[in-house]
Every structure is written in structure tokens, then in C-alpha cells.
Image (cartoon, helix red, strand yellow):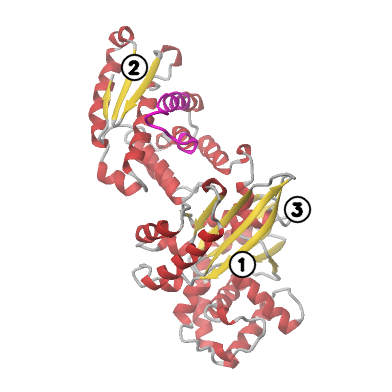
Amino acid sequence: MRDYPSIAAVDLGSNSFHLVVAREVDGRLQLLHKEKQRVYLASGLDSNFNLSDEAIARALDTLSQFATTLHGFPKESVQVVATYTLRNCKNLNYFLAKAKQVFPYPINVISGQEEARLIYQGVANYEHDTHNRLVIDIGGGSTELVIGQHLTHKLLSSRNVGCVTMNKAYFADGKLSAKRFKKAEIKAEQHIESIAASYLKLGWNTVIGTSGTIKTIAAMVAELTASDEITLAKLEQIKQLFIDAQHINNVTLKSLPEERKVSISGGLAVLIALFRQLHIATMRLSDYALREGLLFEMHQTEAFDIRTRTINAFSDHYNIDKLHADNICETIQLFTSQLKTHWPLSNYDVEMLCWAAKLHEVGLAINSSGMHKHGAYIVRHSQLPGFTQAQQLTLSALVRFYRKKIKLPELLELIEGELSHFSRLLAIFRLSILVNQKRQQEQLPELSIAALDNTLVLHVGAQWLASHSLFEADLEQEQGYLKALGIQLTF
């Protein structure tokens, strides 16, 4: 019998946490197991965007359950993403430290744009359509909107309006009225208004809704009208039923679960606002969303790595000297292979360094003075599909400090994880760029590198070094720069 390895995707949403386990069978994914726990994370955000102890406790309890399910799964077989609430909460590092104690897998906080992209991938890889389609996901804290065709997205947006946050603002006590709905709808429309024109201009043939809020609304539509097609008239019918009930606990629809009552009014207001602002005629439901998008990307081969495609497209856009970047990458691979005993780095580390090599000169698009600062800003604030916020910050930090002085306080603001590990990455990156700075590969000496603890030894032929005094002066200067990282460079 063939052994089919399992993979798992975990979605830490603002309303619910989801776990999906699948296996790859002959090039396709077969879903094996699903778990869902309502955590109501977004409701735990205070006015200063700090996550309450109670919300953290609920999240940790669910993560502990997920850890039991995933026991035995290697880290590379599990992808975990966190969305609106965790990307906006101020005490994220405190939460991540607590989570690490009960959940052994890295939690990747992703941007709203990346969340939208993964949602679209989840729909597009399971539901085929030859025309433009609009995919909408109303989450607990944010709403994602994507127009795409086939597997390619054309327009992505994430708006900071969701069912939990809207419910908290307008329906927290459960009371329902026409006045409250009007205020909620206007607020939601304000969030959508700025993107409406660009979406309407591009256009679509079909509209697809995903995830729990829209699924519940679709079920209520079906119960009331015997049709699962969502229209504005049907949404208004549900709203009137809610208003007549006066309180959410008085709504007796079988299709409205008790656990959904704490957020459904806010979600309904957001969906009505979307229908109005985007002139949506009809919407149908899809069972696929972000976690399926994660699973799909996990089982793709390296040739289809979205991050590689992103870096290449970014490089093309900024007219990067590709030969120079490739030469730097060759040096990175040489150095990391020679350092594997005392400074072991993972394949992922090497990939990150090579991606950074392809990005380090994007600041030239602004000007050559302070190009490393300009480049770091561009990398940090651009849309980089496939990259988490932490990964994007790491790339930005490498670009920011690939040359000149290393300012430790500024560096610490950019990186997550151990400084010692990043320091080694940065030292290798800086030296790889330094030896290639003349862009004349044929003039490079034979190089080798070794390390012991925090001492880095670069071997360059003495005769060659004697005839290249400027390079020797650059290395002497680099010795001083690397001291800020606690690394001693000798040559």
C-alpha cells in the first residue's frame, strides 16, 4: 500500500480557529479531517487593540487541542496563519510567546492582502470558471474582496470591517432595530466606498461568498425562500425579520445556530453594504476558503512557489541587475555550504538570503543616496504575495542593513526571533555583496570561509589581497560594522 503523507493547514481567524488535514494522492488533495473551534478573538480586543487575557486563554486552549491532533506532524507539513485580530493586536509578541508553550508550530501573521490572495486560491483551485469572478469573505475583523479569473487574481483588497467588530459596535447587547442597522450599514459602506469604483470598472460575471458568516446567511435565505441564491431583497427580508424580533435571542430560525447569534447581525449589515456599494445582483456560496488555499500551495512543487514568482516579478518591475543578484546568490550558497558545520543554516534561510539578493537594490528606483533605506521601505510596505508579515520584515531588515552601519535598536524593531541567528544571516549577506561589489565575476579571488562561535574567518589569497588594497580597506571597515552584531571578522 502506498504511503501518502499528510499535510495540515491552520487558520487562526478573528471569530473561529480552523484545522484541516489532507493528503496528496496522485497530484490532488484529499481532505481527511476538519476541526473548528469558536474563539471570538476579535471580541477580546480593547480600545487600544490589546488582546484580553480571557481571549488569549480561549485561543491557547484551542491551540492545545490542535496540537494534540497534529502530534507527530513534522513542522514542514503544517502551515499556520493568523489574520485580522492577531495582525492588529498590540500584544502580539506576548500572545506568540504563550502560544509557543502549548503549540509547537510557527504562527505566521499574514497581511490582509495575503489573506485575500489565499482565500481566492482556495476557491479557484476547487471551483473552475472561465470568466472574472468576485470572491467575498466576511471574517470576524475584516472583509476580503478579490476579482480573479482561473487561478489568477486581478484585484485584491482587505477592509477592516467584520462581523464580530461590527456586532460589538452596534449590536453588543443583542437589541435589533432599523436605526441600528442603518448606522451599521453606513459604517460598512464607508469602508467599502473607496474601492468600489475600481471593482466595478474591472467587473465580474459571478459573485461567490465564502466562510461562516455568508454560509449562515445563505442557510437563512434557503430556510425563508427555499433557494440558496443570495440577493439584496432576500437580505432585506432577513433584516426585517431581525428588526421585528427586536432582540437576537428572539430570532427562531433553525438555520441560525446559537453560537452565530453573537456576530450574525454585524455580518448581515456588512453583506447588505457590499451588495449596495458593488451593485451585486446575486451571490452563491462556496465551501472553500483560506485554509484550502493554504493546503493547495503546500502541495505545489518548488517550480510553482508563489514566493519565487513574486520575487521575480518584483525584480522585473524594478529592473534589477539579475546577473549581479545571481552572482551574489552563488556566493551565499558557497559561504553557507562551507559554514554548515559551525553556522548551520536551513534551506529556507538560504532561500531568504537569495531572495534578499534579488531585492537589495530596489532602492535605486528612488536614488542611489540612501538606497538601502529606500529599498527597505519599499520591501516592507509593498504587496509581496506568498510572504508573511514576519518574512517581509526579515527581507526588509536584510535590505536595510546590507551596507554601512548597523543600527541595533532599528534592527531589533524589524526582526522576529533570535538576534544571534539573524546576525549570522546578515553577516553572510553583507560579505556576499561586498565581494561582488565590482560586478566583475572574473576578477574575484578564490574564497573560503570558516567560523567558530562568533568569529568569522574569510580566507583570501594574500597575494591577491596585496594587489587589491581597496578591497582590503573595505574588509577592515566591515570588521568595525560587524562588531555591532557581536561578530568578529578576520581575514
Which residue is under mark 2?
459
Which residue is under mark 3?
130
Mark-to-mark CA distance, 1 and 2: 57 Å
Residue 252 x %, y %: 63, 89
- Residue 397 painted magenta: no
Residue 13 x %, y %: 51, 64
- Residue 329 painted magenta: yes
Residue 17 x %, y %: 53, 65
Quick one: SS at disc 3?
loop
Q: Give the range drawn in magenta.
A: 328-350
Establish if 180 lies above or below 334. below
- Of callouts 2 and 3, which one flags the residue occurring earlier in the amino acid sequence? 3
- Which residue is rendered at x = 58% and y = 82% of the image? 258
- Which residue is rendered at x = 26% and y = 40% of the image? 407
Give the residue type at disc 1: Ser
Does residue 152 appear left or right of residue 350 in this picture? Answer: right
Task: Give residue 211's mark.
Answer: 1
Assess disc 2: are there few (<14), some (14-19) or many (≥20) residues with their C-alpha within 10 Å of its C-alpha: some
Q: Work out whether residue 154 can be spotted.
A: no
Quick one: SS at disc 1?
helix
Q: Work out whether residue 414 can be spotted.
A: yes
Pick the residue in front: 267 or 234: 267
- Between disc 2 and disc 3, the foreground one is 2
- Residue 21: which quarter of the image? bottom right
- Of callouts 1 and 3, which one flags the residue occurring earlier in the amino acid sequence? 3
Mark-to-mark CA distance, 2 and 3: 58 Å
Mark-to-mark CA distance, 1 and 3: 23 Å
